[in-house]
């Protein structure tokens, strides 16, 4: 086994099988695994949302600095760094969360793509009971080893809700600069393009991945709502 399998794939697979044996339903095991991952990632996710919240609040000051020192790039960068430091903002926090999530998502893809095969059960730790086979049905109806387009649609809708919640509110101004118009256009595109891409990605993938994304999105939306409303 390579390093990725040892550090990511095998732990996720073993935890999933343990949850499957305890809960007796593969779909519930996927949801429980999602909850565990969200709990582990909560500090990073909370910091990322906090940074986005504060960044939206200080947007007018950032814009003022950019306009006042548009011809003095070094001064502009210095004042922006001071503004971020004053508000305890780390611009790299979102990138850190993404770097942690990507290998986990890839590991889950491998688990849900290959994990249903009986031969994969050799990856179980010695203390994990081998169930012999895995029943991929969710509540006895949805085969999570196969694609289920309805999950893809739901995942896209929840992605729309997440993007909408984090989108900064547009300021009520009579005229907008070219840069502001471009930013507004990009924001509008991300609001609709990202959810559409999410739905397309999960359309033909094993629906276990779609269920994971749905459960993760629900946790994320609840977390965003709590942090954004928190004073």
Image: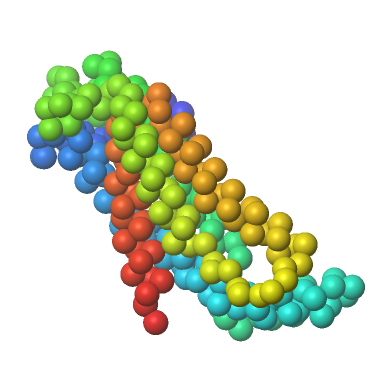
Q: Residue at x 59, y 48 (%)?
A: 189
Foreground pick, 157 / 62: 157
Q: Is residue 63 above or below residue 193?
A: below
Q: Which residue is drawn at 84% across and 78% down?
A: 69
- Give the image location of residue 6, x and y in percent: 39, 34
- Give the image location of residue 118, x and y in percent: 24, 16
Q: Quadrant of residue 94?
A: bottom right
Quadrant housing the C terminus:
bottom left
Foreground pick, 8 / 47: 47
Residue at far right of view: 71
Q: Can residue 6 be seen in this view?
A: no
Q: Is residue 60 above or below residue 34?
A: below
Q: Residue at x 15, y 19 (%)?
A: 132
Q: In this view, does 52 lie to the left or right of 67?
A: left
Q: Quadrant of residue 205?
A: top left
Q: Can residue 14 be seen in this view?
A: yes
- Give the image location of residue 45, x and y in percent: 43, 60
Q: In which quarter of the image is residue 223?
A: bottom left
Foreground pick, 168 / 88: 168
Q: Is residue 2 above or below residue 229?
A: above
Q: Residue at x 72, y 71 (%)?
A: 175
């Amino acid at each position: 086994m390579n390093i990725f399998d040892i550090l990511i794939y095998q732990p996720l697979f073993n935890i999933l099988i343990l949850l499957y044996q305890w809960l007796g339903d593969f779909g519930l095991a996927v949801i429980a695994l999602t909850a565990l991952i969200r709990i582990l990632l909560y500090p990073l996710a909370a910091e990322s949302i906090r940074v986005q919240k504060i960044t939206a609040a200080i947007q007018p000051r950032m814009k003022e600095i950019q306009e006042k020192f548009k011809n003095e790039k070094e001064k502009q960068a210095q004042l922006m760094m001071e503004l971020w430091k004053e508000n305890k903002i780390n611009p790299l926090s979102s990138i850190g969360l993404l770097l942690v999530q990507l290998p986990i998502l890839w590991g889950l893809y491998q688990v849900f793509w290959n994990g249903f095969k009986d031969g994969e059960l050799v990856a179980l730790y010695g203390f994990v009971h081998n169930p012999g086979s895995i029943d991929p049905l969710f509540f006895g109806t949805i085969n999570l080893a196969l694609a289920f387009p309805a999950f893809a649609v739901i995942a896209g809708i929840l992605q729309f809700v997440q993007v909408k919640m984090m989108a900064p509110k547009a300021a009520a101004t009579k005229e907008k600069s070219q840069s502001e118009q471009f930013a507004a256009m990009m924001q509008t595109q991300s609001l609709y393009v990202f959810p559409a891409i999410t739905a397309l990605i999960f359309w033909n993938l094993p629906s276990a991945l779609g269920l994971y994304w749905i459960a993760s999105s629900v946790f994320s939306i609840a977390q965003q709502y709590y942090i954004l409303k928190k004073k």
